[in-house]
Image (cartoon, helix red, strand yellow):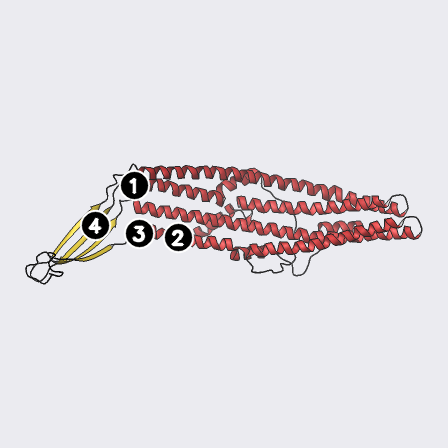
Amino acid sequence: MPYALLIIYILFTGPVFAGELTLQELIQEALVNNHEVLMLEARESVSKFKIPQAESLPDPMFMFGYQNDGVRDLYTFDEEMAADSQWMFSVSQMFPYPGKLSLKGEMAARDAESVRAALDSTRLKVTARVKELYYDLFLTYKSIDLVKDMSALFSRIEEAALARYSTGMAPQQEVLMAQTEKYMLLEKEEMLKQKIQSIEAMLNSTIGRDGYTSIGRPVELKSNEYPYSVEELLQAAYENSPDIKTRQRMIAGAETRVEMMGREYYPDVTVAANYFAKNKYYEDMWGMTATINLPIFYKSRQRPAVLEAEASLSEKKHDLDDTKFMLSSNIRDNYSMLRSSERLMDLYKGGLVPKTYQGFESALAGYAGGKVEAITVITTLKSLIDYELLYWKQFTEREKAIARLEALTTVGVFGKTTLQRQGEEKEWEHEH
């Protein structure tokens, strides 16, 4: 295989390494161990436990006491003439106005649904974060490979400079220039190795691993077609985005709270059963009472509470609108970035990289023949390095934009759209 074709083959396909790191393994580990996900899972459990509590009646109250007959003696219960001495026992239960408990339970259920949607959103964001760091790690390893390949090309320039210097056709400065550029690549390689450790540390933190663990080299990635239009992404986001669902559940809870505060205008009833134990000379007594609270201070309590609930509802509706606007803006921004990266990749792969490589070979041949200066060859090779690195940078930027779009819209997450997975789940439920 000609050398030029070999370089282009390595650039756009790359070698396969043993013990490669797959992205799906990291995502699965992150969804199990990420501390933010675990925190929201615990919060979801908390919100579910609040539902039966909100729907339950208040605890019944038990009262007991003693009533003495007169103040002359401390204890007159056993005296025959102590008609009013008695032991008193009472059990009472407060019953809220009809509908209040069900509304409280509905409010708690809406809160639980909101937390559930927030958990789904966090899982998507953690998945996107893992993907972005994975692609950064891939780019860093790819940059090291390119630096090594370019170092070999600088060695060719160095050999040509030494050959011309040995024959007196070139000054020693040209040899030193080629060697300096090669050593600068070695410096860049060391910096890239340090960057690998930094990215691995961030990946470990996102995954939920304690301490520093070497991640390994990512598998070789390929650029697959992204078939979705921005309109399809926006529609999917409005229908399936957990961020929107979180706000919608919050609005539903706020609407229920408005209705609940309206019920506070109506009184609650406390029913009590009483038993009075007399001494042996008199017959025991029993009684029942009903206590009703009177919301006469509704102007300073119930009415402001309703207005507060309505203001909170308005706030949450505006928050939903703002979330939709931000979501639309982020989707369009990332979609534009994705398509721009694709166009730049085509430009680098189909034009700049091969043409610059041809220019380098021509300049190197001209330098060996004394027709081209060394600085021209070195400048051409540095441009080739830049274009190759820019190609892979645009490749990773495209993949990162796709990862962010998946988190925003749920389209394409784990290879399927949310709508596809929901359809499969409904079909399975229907069959079983």
Given contact means CB atoms under 8 Å apart, are the residues at marks 1 and 4 in contact?
no
Q: Where is residue 20 in the image (x, y as percent from the top left)?
A: 65, 58
Asked where in the image residue 190 lies, by quadrant, the reply is: bottom right
Q: Mark 4 points at which residue?
A: 271
Which of disc 4 and disc 1 is earlier in sequence? 1
Q: Earlier in the sequence, mark 2 or mark 1?
A: 2
Q: Is residue 163 left or right of residue 294?
A: right
User: Mark 2 or mark 3, which is nearer the start of the sequence?
Assistant: 2
Mark closer to the chain start, 3 or 1: 3
Which of disc 4 and disc 2 is earlier in sequence?
2
Residue 3 sits above or below residue 301 on the image: below
Which of the two discs, 2 and 4, sits closer to the camera?
A: 4
The front one of 390 and 82 is 82
Label 2, label 4: how many angstroms apart (C-alpha)? 30 Å
Q: Report helix, strand or loop for mark 4.
A: strand
- Disc 1 element: helix
Q: Name the residue under label 3.
A: 56
Tell me where residue 229 appears, x and y as whole percent.
Answer: 58, 39
Q: Hey, which quadrant is residue 338 in on the image?
A: top right
Image location (x, y in percent) of residue 248? 44, 42
Q: For the residue marked with disc 4, what is the amino acid?
A: Val
In the rendered image, which residue does mark 1 sit on?
263
Direction front: furthest residue: 72
Viewer-proximal residue among 307 and 384: 307
The residue closer to the viewer here, 422 or 153, is 153
Q: Which amino acid does label 3 sit on?
A: Ser
The residue type indicated by label 2 comes to Lys
Q: Residue at x 61, y 47 (%)?
A: 400
- Mark carried by residue 48: 2
